[in-house]
Amino acid sequence: MILMFTITMLIMMISNIMMMLSMILSKKSFMDREKCSPFECGFDPKSSARIPFSLHFFLITVIFLIFDVEIALIFPIIPLFKMTNFIIWTKISLFFFLILLLGLYHEWNQNMLNWTN
């Protein structure tokens, strides 16, 4: 028990010494303030939060997230090929890809994929 306590205290002392050394030896300057600030979509975090942004940028982001989730849903189709026969697998795959293509066609038809709107 005493050995465990001693090892724990030794580890805590070593980690505290290393943190103090890194704080003392690190270079801090006024120029690092910008590097340490959060970066959100190109907006300055120290300015007003009520500035307008491109709605098209938001729509492209939502489309990316939707297709990203759909790609993740495609992965289970591959092991399904070994579990079912070819006809059922083909029907499931074609139905899923048809839904993807219809969604893509609808977004293209609504000019959501055209960046210069």
Image (cartoon, rainbow, N blue to C red):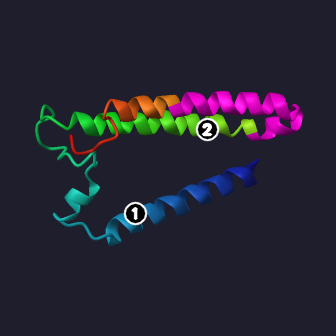
Indicate left or right for 55 with 112 as reference.
Answer: left
Give the residue number, with chain letter if any, for mark 2.
Answer: 72
Mark 2, mark 1: which one is toward the viewer? 2
What residue do we see at 79% from left, 32% from top?
Answer: 89
User: Considering the image in quadrants, where does the C terminus appear?
Assistant: top left
Q: Earlier in the sequence, mark 2 or mark 1?
A: 1
Cα distance, mark 2 to mark 1? 44 Å
Give the amino acid at mark 2.
Ala
Give the residue number, with chain letter if any, for mark 1.
Answer: 20
Q: In this view, does 17 lie above or below 50?
A: below
* Image coordinates for residue 19, horizontal then vertical, percent: 43, 61
Give the amino acid at mark 1.
Met
Indicate left or right for 85 with 7 as reference.
Answer: right
Residues 22 and 38: in front is 38
Residues 60 and 108: in front is 108
What residue do we see at 61% from left, 60% from top?
Answer: 10
The secondary structure making up most of the magenta span is: helix
Highlighted range, magenta: 78-101
Residues at circles 2 and 1 in contact by the CB criterion of under 8 Å: no
